[in-house]
Amino acid sequence: MALAATSPPMVGRVDQLDGLRSALAAATAGTPAMVVLGGEAGVGKTRLVTEFAAEAERGGARVVVGQCVNLGGDGLAYAPITGALRELAGQLGADALLTAAGPGRAALAGLLPELSGGDGDGPPDGTSPGRVYEAVTGLLEQVAADRPLVLVLEDLHWADRSTRQLLGFAVRALSTARLLIVGTYRSDELSRDHPLRRLLAELERIRTVHRIDLPRLTEEEVADQLAGLAGTRPDARAVRRIHARSEGVPFFVEQLADLDDGTSLPESLRDLLLIRVEQLSDDSQRLVRLLAVGNDRVGHDLLAAVADLGADDLDRTLREAVSANVLRVDGDGYAFRHALVREAVHDDLLPGEHARLHALYAATLERRPSPGRGVTAEAAHHWFCAHEHEKSFAASLRAAAEARALAAYDEAQRNFERALELWDQVPEAAAEAGLDHAELLARTASAASNAGEVERALALVEASLAEVRAAGDAVEPSRLARLLGFRGTLLSELGRPGATREVERALELIPADPPTPQRARLLQKYVSRLMMDGRQADALALGREAAALAHRTGETESEFRAYVVLGPSLVHSGHVDEGLEALETAHRLAGDRPEWLVSYHINMSDSLHLLGRYTEAAEVAREGIDRARSVGLARTLGTMMAGNAAEPLMALGHWEKAERMVARALLLDPPGRHVWHLTGLRSWLALWRGDVEAASGFAALVRERLAGHDPGPQYVLPATRAGAEAALGRGEPDLAWRLITGAVDATPGQQYGYVLPLLAAAGWALEARAHSGDATADDVEAGTAWLRDRLAPIGDWGPAPVWTPVIRAHLAGLAGPAPDAWRAALDSVEAAEGPVHLRPFAGYRLAEAYVRLDDRAAAEEPLRRAADEADRLGAGLVRRWIDGLARRARLGLPPSGPDGPGAAFPALTDREREVLRLVAAGRSNRQIGEELFISAKTASVHVSNILAKLGVSGRGEAAARAHREGLLEDDARVS
């Protein structure tokens, strides 16, 4: 990455910045305040204060900064105060400063000798500390009378005794000045007997003193910081790696940003991290090195066993390291204050020391009476680091088997991968493992696939296939068939061509007679591929055969999976009741097996959604997400289920909830085809909320990622819808028409659930092309015929009674305004539970038809209802159309009632009025987010939109208007 020195935009810190703003607002109103800002080194205290100071200066405040200096001992007297006063003199001029100091000017002479020609060794002889305190406090009060003053004192943990005492005096003495004091300190520097601890305890009892702690960044915030540094969104895996190593400390994030391959720490950073360790006694340093070899956290009992120290000596050395903030107590064990310190200490070990200590841990762990799963994996790691290859190999295989049995697939993969790495270094590895190298590759691939590492799984399977094929005739066809079938599944997961053909090859290797469980498994896999390819008729023909063969051979899982595939194939083909019955059969066969039930929840939720049974679909999908999480499949099938849950929630109008679900799923870095699905949903949400540019970007991203892939209609058609509707939002109906017709015509079989929304978008595009003159009469006639031909076979299947009237209204509009058709469409969408975005859309189109017929009176009622519905949903796209039509036709959009919640601030949406009410109540962006179940960032966007719509300069002015116009009273009356 090419990096900026620091991330250009400040990341996060919403609550902390709001706290500083609130304190400044109080000080500006005449109540002096102090904010004590604490946080560990590198967490971003100076960056936050710098951002706040710049904002305060833009708002009219004067800002001066004093820096405490680390000189050892108690430091130089009044150092930060002197620095701040010197900066103040530079801003005001010496004469003005002396005038403001009044009778205290003599006491200030020692602090600022340049004002009186002194030598600057401190206050003049005979000047008591009390006089200095009075002089500085009086000066600050006088200066703040002209304009609000912000005094920043950095690094108070290094403050001298005189500065601490002056600070305590000033906070108590000032009662009316327009002064805000902001002091920063490193929380990790405060030992139990640090003098600043006493001052902080005293200050916290004062009402006007506020303490703000600066936390580490979340993973999402680290991603934002890395994007700011590099100018592009980083890879999710790099984000996870850097967040894990930095633990969210911004300084460490910056240092690690260009080490995105996980390489060792820069020498300068390692030296910085080791400073505190090197100040410990030799005994404590030895113990710290021993802890660095352990896990991220080492229990006390384990540490006592490996340290081989007496209890008193162990406690003494631990207490020293804890007091020095190198270690911290973590439950009944110990951990490093920061993971990078552990990394730096571990990297500093001598080679022999490194191997010896790791072997000590491994042997100690294996001597424990009941090692357990985690202990086995830990011992395998320690044996590996100690270069004890045979012991590590055996322990890795045991740990992988234990992890796989508990559905901990990522852990299983790590241990299998270690065993693969050691294979050539272990004599008689096959005999030790009880399997050959090709089989170990296949098992590792299985774990990787379940852990979501599909690309890695495919590479492992291909390596296994190469070894098996190299054995020639000595290999049983059943083994080759199993690997080919697995490869076909992985190709399908990645959306790559050739998946179905690979399963066919596997099936050809296993004869139909006699019937075998393997034939049943492969036949079911082949039926699944046919369904994914959209070949419903073929899937139906073989699906029943696959279920019967599985039942006959006792292959219960294959029978279950045959019905799981047969159900959606029947539903898509128009046999709805029979399809749902097949899915219920699958449910019964699954029993209480959670992994099987996840597959049932996926296909049942998708089928219900496509049928327009949105509430049921969302509930089934939510249950499936919980099941996927419980069996270690959150990143794979869990993210697929998140999309299945988000879609019906969007249809029901729960857009915020759907957005959060999609965002959380994407943070898990799911496999490719799930990313395509989720990104398409983001495009749809962005479009209907009114952000056409973002919608177009998401749609283009999906189209780019789909290029060269063959994922099947269930991915291609929704991606086409995202791209086509985004094109319509941009005013490009020709492109939308080409996208839709091309995709629908290329789709084999019946895909009614996916095609219906596309046909509605096609009707919209055709109507727009006809009215713009871009389509000839022949084009319109051919397009109409194309639409009618595609719509006719669907009949009243699933949600067709909702979509068909909308499509017919578009076609009716080809001949001119069609209010009757749009009235019928509006009635149909209002009678259904969803998709609810069609309600404001159809209402707007009905009003538009009346306006085009010059019947403005008839247009007002549906337009007002459409506006209310659009505001409730947050459908900014339709709301913009409504506002434009109202302006053009000179239609008023009065609120729904004179006393309704829209009476105040009619320009704001319902959500924006909710946000404004909370702003007026003094809530921060994070508090607003928590109350409204949105992110702090979304709350910040709402606040910015509100300020722009109201034409006010800040939150205070907006809050004042909310109180003045009775918004809070309106809300109380409505509730």
Image (cartoon, grey):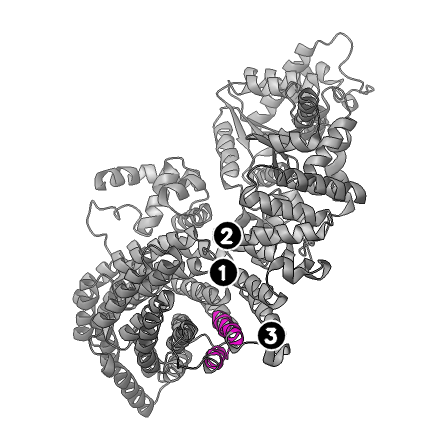
Q: Residue furthest bottom?
A: 778
Alpha carbon separation for disc pair 3 and 2: 28 Å
Name the mark on residue 450.
1
- Badge 3 marks a residue whose secondary structure is helix
Q: In the picture provided, is 307 more to the left or to the right than 11? A: right
Callout 2 amino acid: Ala
Say which residue label 2 marks.
408
Residue 536's x, y, as percent? Answer: 33, 79
The crowd level at tag 2 (other Cα within 10 Å; few <14, some 14-19, many 20+) is many
Callout 3 amino acid: Val
Q: In the picture provided, is 721 more to the left or to the right than 28? A: left
Callout 1 amino acid: Asn
Earlier-in-chain disc, 1 versus 2: 2
Across the whole image, how many numbered discs are drawn on residues?
A: 3
Say which residue label 3 marks.
468
Q: Which residues are magenta?
A: 479-506
Q: Residue furthest top?
A: 126
Alpha carbon separation for disc pair 1 and 2: 9 Å
Name the mark on residue 708.
none
Residue 115's x, y, as percent? Answer: 76, 23
In magenta stretch: residue 315: no
In magenta stretch: residue 504: yes
Quarter of the figure with the C terminus: top left
* Front residue (pair 815, 192): 192
Question: In which quadrant of the rendered view does residue 361 lie?
Answer: top right
